[in-house]
Image (cartoon, helix red, strand yellow):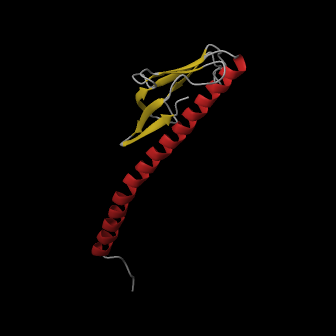
Amino acid sequence: MQRAFTLIELVLVMATLGIAAAIAVPRFAEGSHTRRLDAFEQRLLADIEHARRLAQARSASVMMVFDPINDTYVITGARNPVTGESSSYMVQTGDSPYRIDLQTVDLGGDAVLIHDGYGTRDSGGTITIASGDLTRTITIDAP
C-alpha cells in the first residue's frame, strides 16, 4: 500500500510556509536597511576623522562639502583611495554598497564642515540619512 499526502495536507503546509515568509521578509528588509545605515555612519565618521587628520598633517584647512540634493559629499584636497586622484575625494551615498539618501545637512547653518590647520572643526551639527523607511540623525559635536 502506497502512502501519499492529501491535497488538504499540502495546502496546510503551503499556507504555513506563506505565513512564515510574510513575517520574515519585512524583518529581513528592515535588517538590511539597518546594516546600510550602520555601515554608512561608520564610513562618514571615519571620513570626518580623515579630514581632521589631513588638516593637521598639512597645517591647512580641509573642507567637507555635503550636497543632499545629489547625495554626495566631497573632501577637498584629499586623495581618492579608489581612483588615486588627488584633487578631491567624493563619496556618492546613493551608490552601492550603501544606497543611502542624504536627507538633510545642518552644520552651523550650512552644509560645509571645515577643519582648520589644527584639526579643529568650525561647527557642529546634524546629518540626517535614510534607507528605506528608516531614518537616522548623526550628530557632529561642536568644537
Q: Nearer the viewer, residue 19 or 43?
A: 43
Residue 104 x %, y % = 39, 29
Spot occupied by residue 90 in the image (x, y as percentages of width and height): 55, 21
Viewer-closest of 2 and 92:
92
Where residue 50 appears, as percent x and y from the top left, is 64, 28
In the rendered view, tell whether residue 77 sits above or below residue 33.
Answer: above
* Residue under the point 53% across and 25% down: 91
When asked about the image quadrant of residue 117, the answer is top right
Asked whether residue 59 is in view, the answer is yes
What residue sits 62% from the left and 13% below the top? 87
**Quadrant that contains the N terminus:** bottom left
Residue 94, visible in the rendered structure: no
The residue located at (37%, 78%) in the rendering is 4
Residue drawn at x 60%, y 33% as measured from the top left: 46
Is residue 126 shown left or right of residue 48? left
Image coordinates of residue 112 in percent, x first then y, are 49, 20
In the drawing, does residue 37 fall left or right of residue 18?
Answer: right
Locate residue 83: give its quadrant. Answer: top right
Q: Residue furthest right?
A: 57
Residue at the outermost left position: 8
Check the image and report above or below for 5 versus 49. below
